[in-house]
Image: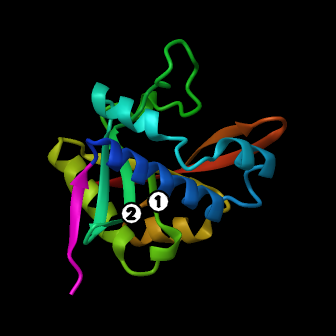
Amino acid sequence: MENLHFVDACESEHFKAMSLIHALGWRDTYAGYVPGDYMAREITDDRWVKFFREDYELGRCHGLLLYRDDTPVSCLNYGAARTQNYNAGEASVFPNDAYAGWGEIISFYTHPAERGRGYGGLLFEEALRRLKADGHDSAFVFVLRENGKARRFYAAHGFAWDGTHADIPFPPDAVCVDLRYTKAL
């Protein structure tokens, strides 16, 4: 029998595991949508380690992993909805003023080799439970418009597109569209 357990990301090994799962998820999911040169240059295994560490240290959001025994199989970041970019002075790519007070699933990936086993659903529902316990009545997640599999996943968990989106520029001239999926908790 599998020993599945949640781990709150708070140590370097957690941040490294999350970054690797994110990088593998990006490479698998966004190939053909995000420019290949950007992926090759920017999406490294350790790309997000410093961001996850800073988020933890500053309390901006929470990292959560699902482990099977000693193996991290899925991870996400959740917290209060971002109403501005974390870098002071930058305009937000995700204008969220109308969503102040909401919870947000900021990022969410399951290791590509571990998909289809229900791990992502367990982790996702745990994050929603925690957002509700933190006092959020509603939550949202952004999803790439072309990512039909993820859109079906969110719909199966009670989320629906609310008609809003964010354009995500990728140099030099590509733009991806993220749709905002929402749910009352």
Looking at the image, which residue sits at the far top? 89
Confirm whether residue 103 shows in the render: no
What is the quadrant of the C terminus in the image?
A: bottom left
Q: Amino acid at mark 2?
A: Ser
Residue 107 point in image, percent of width and height: 45, 49
Colouring method of the image: rainbow
The local crowd at label 2, few if under 14, some if 14 to 19, many if 20 or more residues have their Cα within 10 Å, is many
On the rendered structure, is 3 left or right of 184? left
Residue 3 covered by magenta stretch:
yes
Which residue appears at 44% of the width and 55% of the height? 108
Which residue appears at 39% of the width and 81% of the height? 117
Residue 134 point in image, percent of width and height: 18, 42
Which residue appears at 52% of the width and 70% of the height? 112
Identify the residue under disc 2. 74
What is the quadrant of the N terminus in the image?
A: bottom left
Confirm whether residue 177 shows in the render: yes
Identify the residue under disc 1. 109
Residue 137 point in image, percent of width and height: 24, 46
* Prevailing secondary structure class for the magenta stretch in the rendered image: strand
Q: Which residues are magenta?
A: 1-8
**Contact flag, marks 2 and 1 (Cβ < 8 Å):** yes
Along the line of sight, the residue nearer the viewer: 170 or 133: 170
Residue 48 covered by magenta stretch:
no
